[in-house]
Image (spheres, grey):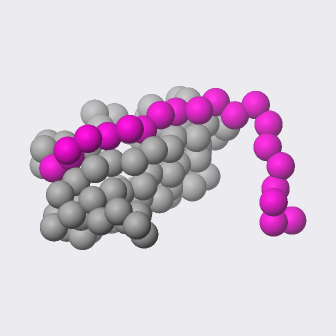
Amino acid sequence: MLIVSGHLSVDPAERASYLEGCRRVVELARAAPGCLDFAISGDLLDDGRINVHERWETQADVEAFRGSGPSGEQQAALLAASVAEYDVAGWRSLTE
């Protein structure tokens, strides 16, 4: 399993618009082969922060989905980004 996690920084006045622009990306990701979870959401405490969380079955799955990455418009709106991929060797459920 692969986890992609981190955050993006945008102008607080543009966050809602940025998130709405990501709606289709989330829909496509969740329908993509190998996607276990995909979420892009506004942070509760920081109006300029967008949290990123993805879980994928394999590196090949995430690479096949990601393609060329964010659109030019989305890329231009970013003030900063800190997102990383993590290879998961094992896990345990906290809800079952």
Total numbered badges shown on the rendered structure: 0
Does 17 appear above or below 5? below
**Residue extending furthest toward the front:** 45
Residue 74 position within the rendered picture, expressed as x and y whole percent measured from the top left:
19, 49
Residue at 17% x, 64% y: name it.
14
Q: Is residue 81 magenta?
A: yes
Q: Nearer the viewer, residue 10 or 31?
A: 10
Residue at 69% x, 34% y: name it.
88
Residue 4 position within the rendered picture, expressed as x and y whole percent measured from the top left:
51, 41
Does 75 appear above or below 59? below
Q: Is residue 11 magenta?
A: no
Span of residues in magenta: 77-96
Q: Residue 70 vs residue 30: left or right?
A: left
Q: Residue 73 vs residue 30: left or right?
A: left
Residue at 40% x, 67% y: name it.
45
* Quadrant of image for the N terminus: top right
* Quadrant of image for the C terminus: bottom right
**Residue 58 visible (yes or no):** no
Residue 49 position within the rendered picture, expressed as x and y whole percent measured from the top left:
33, 57
Q: Residue 14 vs residue 45: left or right?
A: left
**Residue 92 visible (yes or no):** yes
Residue at 22% x, 54% y: name it.
10
| Residue 19 quadrant | bottom left
